[in-house]
Image (tube, helix red, strand yellow):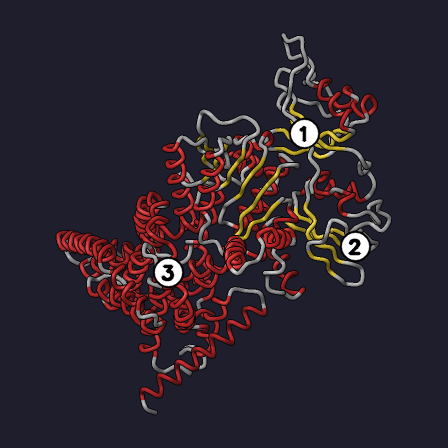
Amino acid sequence: MQEDFRLILDLVTLLAAASVGGLLASALRQPALLGYLLGGTIVGPAGLGWIKELIQVETLAQFGVALLLFTLGVEFSLGELKKVKAIALGGGTLQIVLTIAVTSSVALMMGWLTSPVQGIFLGAILSLSSTAVVIKSLMERNEMETPHGQVMLGILVVQDLALGLMLAVLPALNEPAEAISISVASALLRIGLFAIAAIGFGTYIVPRLLRMLAKTESQELFLLGVVTLCLGIALVTYYLGFSIEMGAFVAGLMISEVEYADQTLTYVEPLRDLLAALFFVSVGMLIDPVFLWNHLEVILGLVCLVLIGKFLIVAPIVRLFGYSLRTALIAGFGLGQIGEFSFVLTAQGQALGLVSRQVYLLILGTTALTLVLTPFLLKLMPQVLNWAETIPGLTGFFDRTAMPLGMSEERPLENHVVVCGYGRIGKKVVQLLQSHNYPVVAIDSTERAIQQLRGAGIPYIYGNAASLHVLQAAGIDRASAMAIAVHDPMSTRLCLKRALELSPDLDVVVETDLEKDIEMLYQLGAWEVVQSEFEVSLEVATHLLMGVGFPLSGIRREIEQIRQHHYLDLRPERSASDVARELQSATQDLNGKWYDLPERSPLIGMTIEQTDLRRLTGVSLLAIRRRDGEELDYPDSQVNFEVGDKLLLVGEPEEFATVEDLAKGEIAVPREHRSCQWLTVPDRSLNRGKTLSELDLRRQYAVQVQAIRREAHFIRFPHGDTAIEGGDRLLLCGARTSLQRVRDAIALAEEGVSTPVSVAIGSGRDRP
């Protein structure tokens, strides 16, 4: 068979394997990446042996990784890279050095290797993580903008840079120390010269080149020029002794600062996805199932050692740089695999005699399994952490790690707006509020944003906006409104839910990039959900309609209706099964469960609005499954509960227990014309230390204490023997006049004060 035709046949075979494997993974609701790896294993040399031209296929696969890193650079931008420069440069370098040191020490002590040189080589291999697999997994879960996504990306960039240094030093490992020093110095010099040249080229040449290509108004020419630029810079880095992937990433960073970045992404992404799939299939071809099976115990042991060992190195480093425990744990497991670039190092090491053929195959098998496990770990870790945070023994531990890292001394105490996220949108919101002299507090978890807030003199809280401690420090219970502009979908949901736990009547506006999250956020309690793309479309349509003569009042009325209907007129129609699947996936991240409504429950026949589940119990109702199998996703407030209903609830274990008490009739639903308000007990109140039975609010005022918020603890429907403490926040329900009388009674004279003391109390507004 002719060689060129053989290559075409191999490419068709690989693409077909990727398609079938991807479809199988999708059907099993797994990342498509796993399907690509499986397809490559089946058609590769160790499987059916259908692929013959391995070198040519692997060369094309390298183009796929190069384009993947190129588009990442375009999306990431130098501005984003600066946000994590500390953890990237300091943490990434420390991680590589510690991995090499620990691996060398352990391997030599256990007698696995015979010389320190072999230990250094093995440590270098283990220190590299998979840029391609991690990025692909983060992109599929829309987590590139999350704190753990940014941290992992920063460390991965440094690892890719270090690969060039490792390749330069590798041939000199068996030489005297002077030769190693010369190799290191030479590599560092080349890196410095390349960085200087890249800055100059990106500043003066790239913008002019892209403008020239854009003026042709030819998509083909623009794509051809951009790909040539990407691969050209990648080849330069290759000839300098570094990886082509690093060069492609640098090329993307150059374009990210130019006005044609979005256009570049639009043209390159389809080609990138095709060739990236080819890369993952080619990695799958390296997996030898027979060898894995024959050495299964050894390889599984090595996989556990690698995952646990790298986790124990990465997670403490991330914590050391001031990130939350949650971010550190996810990053630790997310970077626990051995990267695909380790194949290059391993092959070089075998050629230089640093490892035997047996060790080479063991490294390949271990690497392959860690790559396969990574998407599962990144998907599973947030769910495991959500579950762990509900365990009584661990709750306090997680709480301590979620404390604010810093805050401005002077902050508004009441009637202010809390803005979560000081990014592109959050910054504009703060500017507009301050232009109207409205008090504001900004929350952000990045050092760069906090520095900007300090410089501008804006009150801030440095920490995770989804933390109860951070929200309490921001005075969320005394705020008039809240805006959430956090890029991480899971953090957005948690921030919304926990803010409403502290202040159930709070006016919360949420910005989201995902249209599938709109109904979820409304159901969790948001007053308004803003979707960026839809809002841009509405503004463009407004301008065009006004230009052709439509009256402005009519346009505004129609747009307002679109917003009130949650953009349904603009959103593509989705099948009920797609909505149910997305809902199930989201509730896994939020600790969701199905609850069977008792057949004689007093809730049967009542509407969702009448039961007021969120205020009374803290849970959010996201779906109802009828006895006949019909499923109502994101049910309307006027939907009635029926016999045999199953309820999909999101909440904490104690909140689920309260729902069960309510559904069984052990707790009564408040009657109509009753309000619920929060009241804070002063620290020096004469009533502190008294039990609820002693206060006897139900008999004296017909007011019920439905919840107590005590620091990070939330007590729903407390017993009569529960004593109140200074600083407690009580959720009281009753007639408005009665609530006013209770406020005066509980806030009776503080020690040494003879007049009633005013306390913080919620507005008690009814939701529209």
Tell me the residue that label 3 is attached to. 339
Q: Where is residue 235 shown, x and y percent of the image?
A: 24, 67
Q: Which quadrant of the figure has residue 516?
A: bottom right
| Circles 2 and 1 in contact, beta carbons < 8 Å | no
Going by the numbered disc 1, the residue's amino acid type is Trp
Q: Where is residue 324 shown, x and y percent of the image?
A: 46, 40
- Residue at 40%, 30% (x, y): give it: 457
Front position in the image: 336 or 303: 336
Q: Is residue 11 left or right of residue 720?
A: left
Q: Which quadrant of the figure has residue 698?
A: top right
Going by the numbered disc 3, the residue's amino acid type is Gly
Q: Where is residue 435 shown, x and y percent of the image?
A: 46, 35
Front position in the image: 4 or 362: 4
Residue 413 visible in image: yes
- Point out the frontmost of discs 1 and 3: 1
Badge 2: few (under 14), some or many (20 or more) residues near its Cα, within 10 Å? many
CA distance separating discs 2 and 1: 32 Å
Q: Is residue 99 left or right of residue 177?
A: right
Tell me the residue that label 1 is attached to. 678
Task: Quarter of the image for the N terminus: give it.
Answer: bottom left
Q: Which quadrant of the figure has residue 632?
A: bottom right
Element type at mark 2: loop
Q: Where is residue 319 shown, x and y percent of the image?
A: 42, 40
Q: Is residue 212 left or right of residue 550?
A: left
Q: Mark 2 or mark 1, which has the lower sequence index?
A: 2
Image height check: is 699 above or below 441?
Answer: above
Q: Mark 1 or mark 3, which has the lower sequence index?
A: 3
Going by the numbered disc 2, the residue's amino acid type is Asp
- Point out the frontmost of discs 2 and 3: 2
CA distance separating discs 2 and 3: 48 Å
Element type at mark 1: strand
